[in-house]
Image (cartoon, helix red, strand yellow):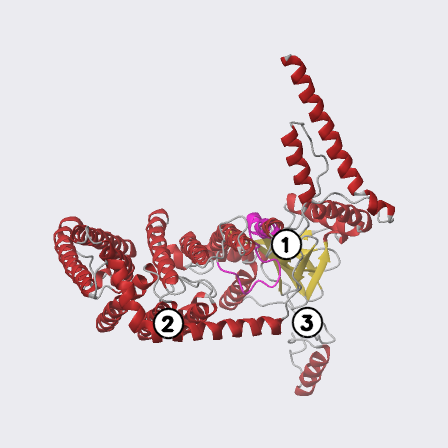
């Protein structure tokens, strides 16, 4: 019996389910009959069918349910309409704020009574009194803690001629002690205030608001006290004279106290959800006062270089930072007021830069301590490219980038979030800074080695017209490697930046490969030039500064590129020669040079005596303090070289380093001339010999007319005398 009842129930369920499905199908039949096509049931119809099936106990599976209709996209809004909407929103907000201010005498007492449960505002004054007393107690505790800890932990201040590391350690140690004392004082004050108002929830709101503002004000004052150090010149981080530092700090303190009082009211109004007009007015006044205090301090310190470093833009920032700070504060106040009126939250426009500046100053100061320890100052820093300068610029860039990231994050730009608005821009900034740091390190290493090579080679010989000594092999090859590394860093940085903005760089690599193949096939001459230059450099055939002859041109190697070199002729012209066009190369500046000088003496001169005199002169020149060290081998005579119609030609020679032979040659000629004049040795040259008919000298018994005729003949022949 029970089994039959169960079977009948199941049959009724199946029949009911079939009936529901038929009803759903028939519901679409009229539409199909009208030629409109079969329409899917609406979500409401599906819901009714599913409910009926559940009531009948029939399992039902809905397949192909239509998705919800997409929301219609709003039409694009033009600039004029946006301006109109913004203007209307600001106007409505001004009207509401005006109404809130007008109703404040009635709404505020009711709000205060609702918060405290008692009529009147006496509890507000009691809470403010608790805040004032506890903050004064906290200041007293802070002063006592600083007075006890400073002599015990810090010691004596550094002397006036102390180095940067000593001053930084003292200033940072002093800042840490002051910060610890401030934390102890504020913590004790907050604990006392919490105990005093623990049974009054409404007063707790005032205390919390007051201590939030007190933390910000105390951190700001600590920053100015550490940087200006009005009472401790030895710990001052900025080059400010004592009177100006004290006046600027006192102005900041007075302004911060006044601004802090209003900021407490503004924070409390926001916390208790006071009428919007009151909160907006309080926030606007606080922003304006804070901007005024900071702008006044910046303008007072306008002659102080607050931006350290030697980067290209740093001098401009050091001169213009007060104007930039004042301009920013004006824009920040305007943005704060506009944000309040338009309903856009704009917190942090004034506080965030101070926080970022404090963090950047702390990071930069700690980094400088590391720099001073890793790269101590040396006497070579002024003459050679220094890693110390590179490290100082690098840590400054990193500190500035960190401060910029924190500032953008405080403004809501999201530089550290995956979907942040400025994440691609900040990523590009990071890539540029890292690439610049890496390239600067490589350039400093290369330039330092090049400078050391040039210093070891000595000063350039200005008298070397041809065959001057060149640079070293490292001095020739390093610039090529430096340029190659620069290109590699630039390409990698460009690829990373393109990837950061969403560009697929894989096709670029494929395209670069195709371009390389095309260049390889179409620029065979270029490839030949490049490979020829590589093998010339491997063979050490020439170096920068050497005097070479390529067959078609000669001169001093002035510049080497990837496919050609430039030769400066000793008369001025500059030749550019592709490496592939060089078939033979003669180097006049390698290792040593032998200079051979011809000297002509008259017939009948004792050549053996001349040889001995020249040898003795060579020994004397070796002892000469000016050119003695320039000789590789001393001056010596090679004897008679040849005889011609003008006399006997002898030759002397000496060996020097390339480039020194010209200076030595001048001295050798001068000393030989003095030697021959002193020893009575005459130089040979053109001369006319006139003899009489009997074979004797023409001067023997010759008349004056005969001597005059002989002199005329001598002059016509270009001779130097007669005999």
Which type of secondary structure does the marked residue at label 1 adopt? loop
| Magenta-span inclusion, residue 663 | no
Position of 705 compared to 321: left or right? right
Magenta segment: 459-487
Q: Which secondary structure, mark 2?
A: helix
Position of residue 423 in the picture relative to residue 695 (left or right)? left
Task: Look at discs 3 and 1 and give the one toward the viewer.
Answer: 1
Q: Tell me if 273 is positioned left or right of 618 in this view.
A: left
Kindly report which numbered mark, 2 or 3, lies closer to the viewer in this rendering: 2
Give the numbered dot on residue 128.
none
Near-viewer residue (485 or 246): 246
Q: Are marks 3 and 1 in contact (CB under 8 Å)?
A: no
Q: Which residue is mark 1?
A: 588
Lateral position of residue 394 relative to residue 420, left or right: left
Assess whether residue 475 is covered by the magenta stretch. yes
**Crowdedness near tag 2: few (<14), some (14–19) or many (≥20) residues, C-alpha within 10 Å:** many
For the C terminus, the quadrant is bottom right
- Can you tell which mark lies on residue 686? 3
> What is the spatial separation of the Cα atoms under label 3 and label 1, in whole angstroms?
34 Å
Could you say which quadrant of the image residue 381 lies in?
Answer: bottom left
Q: Are marks 1 and 2 in contact (CB under 8 Å)?
A: no
Question: What mark, if any, has residue 100 been given in the picture?
Answer: 2
What separation in Å lies between label 1 and label 2 (alpha carbons)?
Answer: 94 Å
Question: From where the camera sits, is residue 303 visible?
Answer: no
Would you call the spot at circle 3 few (<14 residues within 10 Å), some (14-19), or many (20 or more)?
Answer: some
Q: Nearer the viewer, residue 115 or 695?
A: 115
Residue 533 point in image, percent of width and height: 69, 49
- Image x and y of residue 395, in percent: 41, 53
**Which tag, 1 or 2, sits closer to the chain's start?**
2
Q: Name the residue nearer the viewer: 42 or 148.
A: 42
- Relative depth, front residue between 392 and 530: 392
Q: Secondary structure at mark 3?
A: loop
């Amino acid at each position: 019996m029970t089994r039959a009842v169960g079977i009948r129930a199941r049959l009724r369920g199946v029949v009911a389910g079939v009936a529901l499905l038929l009803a759903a199908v028939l519901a679409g039949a009229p539409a199909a009959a009208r030629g409109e096509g079969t329409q899917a049931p609406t979500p409401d119809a599906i819901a009714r069918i599913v409910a009926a099936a559940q009531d009948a106990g029939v399992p039902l599976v809905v397949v192909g349910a239509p998705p919800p209709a997409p929301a219609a996209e709003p039409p694009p809004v033009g600039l004029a309409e946006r301006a109109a909407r913004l203007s209307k929103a600001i106007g409505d907000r001004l009207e509401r704020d005006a109404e809130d201010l007008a109703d404040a005498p009635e709404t505020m007492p009711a709000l205060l009574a609702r918060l405290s449960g008692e009529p009147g505002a006496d509890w507000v004054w009691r809470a403010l009194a608790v805040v004032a007393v506890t903050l004064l107690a906290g200041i007293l505790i802070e002063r006592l803690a600083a007075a006890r800890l400073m002599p015990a932990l810090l010691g004596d201040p550094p002397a006036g001629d102390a180095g940067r590391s000593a001053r930084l350690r003292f200033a940072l140690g002093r800042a840490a002690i002051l910060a610890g004392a401030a934390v102890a004082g504020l913590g004790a004050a907050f604990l006392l205030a919490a105990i005093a108002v623990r049974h009054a929830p409404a007063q707790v709101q005032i205390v919390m608001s007051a201590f939030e503002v007190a933390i910000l004000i105390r951190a700001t004052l600590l920053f100015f006290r550490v940087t200006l150090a009005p009472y401790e010149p030895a710990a001052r981080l900025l080059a400010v004279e004592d009177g100006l530092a004290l006046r600027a700090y006192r102005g900041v303190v007075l302004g911060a106290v006044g601004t802090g009082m209003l900021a407490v009211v503004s924070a409390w109004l926001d916390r208790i959800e006071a009428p919007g007009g009151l909160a907006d007015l309080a926030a606007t006044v606080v922003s304006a006062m804070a901007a005024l205090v900071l702008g006044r301090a910046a303008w007072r310190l306008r002659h102080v270089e607050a931006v350290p470093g030697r980067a290209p833009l740093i001098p401009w920032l050091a001169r213009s930072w007060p104007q930039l700070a004042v301009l920013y504060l004006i824009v920040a106040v305007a943005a704060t007021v506009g944000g309040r009126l338009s309903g856009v939250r704009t917190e942090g426009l004034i506080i965030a830069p101070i926080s970022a500046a404090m963090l950047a100053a702390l990071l930069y100061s700690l980094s400088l301590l590391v720099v001073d320890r890793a790269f101590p100052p040396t006497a070579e820093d002024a003459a050679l490219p220094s890693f110390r300068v590179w490290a100082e610029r690098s840590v400054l860039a990193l500190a500035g980038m960190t401060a910029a990231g924190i500032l953008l994050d405080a403004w809501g730009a999201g530089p550290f979030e995956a979907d942040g608005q400025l994440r691609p821009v900040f990523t590009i900034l990071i890539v540029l800074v890292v690439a610049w740091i890496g390239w600067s390190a490589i350039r400093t290493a290369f330039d330092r080695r090049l400078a050391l090579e040039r210093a070891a080679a000595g000063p350039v010989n200005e008298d070397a017209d041809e065959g001057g000594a060149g640079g070293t092999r490292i001095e020739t090859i390093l610039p090529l490697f430096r340029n190659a590394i620069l290109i590699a860093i630039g390409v990698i940085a460009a690829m990373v930046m393109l990837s950061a903005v969403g560009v697929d760089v894989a096709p670029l690599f494929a395209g670069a490969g195709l371009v390389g193949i095309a260049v390889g096939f179409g620029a065979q001459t270029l490839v030949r030039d490049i490979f020829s230059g590589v093998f010339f450099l491997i063979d050490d055939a020439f170096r920068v500064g050497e005097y070479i002859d390529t067959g078609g041109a000669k001169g001093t190697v002035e510049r080497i590129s990837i496919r050609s070199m430039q030769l400066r002729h000793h008369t001025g012209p500059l030749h550019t020669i592709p490496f592939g066009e060089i078939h033979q190369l003669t180097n006049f500046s390698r290792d040593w040079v032998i200079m051979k000088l011809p000297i002509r003496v008259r017939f009948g001169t004792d050549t053996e005596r001349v040889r001995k005199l020249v040898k003795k002169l060579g020994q004397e020149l070796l002892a000469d303090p000016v050119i003695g060290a320039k000789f590789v081998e001393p001056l010596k005579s090679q004897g008679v070289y040849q005889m011609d119609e003008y006399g006997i030609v002898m030759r002397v020679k000496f060996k020097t380093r390339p480039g020194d032979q010209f200076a030595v040659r001048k001295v050798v000629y001068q000393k030989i001339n003095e030697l021959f004049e002193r020893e009575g040795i005459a130089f040979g040259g053109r001369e006319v010999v006139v003899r009489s008919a009997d074979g004797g000298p023409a001067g023997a018994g010759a008349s004056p007319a005969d001597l005059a005729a002989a002199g005329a003949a001598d002059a016509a022949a270009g001779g130097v005398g007669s005999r």
